[in-house]
Image: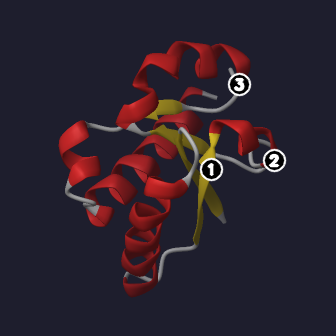
Amino acid sequence: MKHLVLVCAVGMSSSMLVNRMIRVAEKQELEVMIHASGMGDLTSFTDAADALLISPQIHYMEEKIKAKYPHIPVMSLSSKDYAEMDGEKVLRQGLDLIEDGLMKE
């Protein structure tokens, strides 16, 4: 099973997008766990995370997150996809990020 973590400042706004992503994954019968996390709680998800998706609010922290978790693929989400709560598009981006990371190993 794949594990995606959507990271924002506190984890509140990302939970709505995560719910949409979960609905899409269920409809497509995908085996994926999706979690929302604030920066303060991120370490509790990183052991199982296959990819980290960074919300636009903390885009400026992307390099710091990559340095702290070099074994996990990291990507910043576009402001447009995040604002539109496009669960299908963000889920696809996350799954593609995992696949890209697996091909590099």
The x, y position of residue 29, in whole percent, is: 46, 83
Identify which amino acid the numbered label 1 is placed on.
Answer: Ser
Q: Earlier in the sequence, mark 2 or mark 3?
A: 2
Residue 9: quadrant of the picture? top right
* Earlier sequence position, callout 1 versus callout 2: 1
Q: CA distance from mark 2 to mark 3?
A: 13 Å
For the residue pair 39 and 53, the one nearer the viewer reads as 39
Please tell me which residue is depicted at 27% across the width and 60% down the height of the picture: 85
Q: What's under tag 2, amino acid-wise?
A: Ser
Residues marked 1 and 2 touching at CB (< 8 Å): yes
Circle 3 residues within 10 Å: few <14, some 14–19, many ≥20: some
Q: Amino acid at mark 3?
A: Tyr
Q: Which mark is residue 37?
A: 1
Q: Quadrant of residue 19?
A: bottom left
Residue 22: x and y, percent? 47, 74
- The image's mark for residue 44 is 2
Q: Could you tell me how far apart the alpha carbons at marks 1 and 2 are, in whole angstroms?
A: 9 Å
Please tell me whether residue 21 is drawn above or below residue 104 in the rendered image. below
- Tag 1 near tag 3, CB within 8 Å: no
The one nearer the camera, 97 or 39, is: 39
Q: Nearer the viewer, mark 2 or mark 3?
A: 2
Residue at 56% x, 27% y is 104
Q: Are marks 2 and 3 in contact (CB under 8 Å)?
A: no
- SS state under label 1: strand
Judging by the rendered image, the residue that carries numbered circle 3 is 69
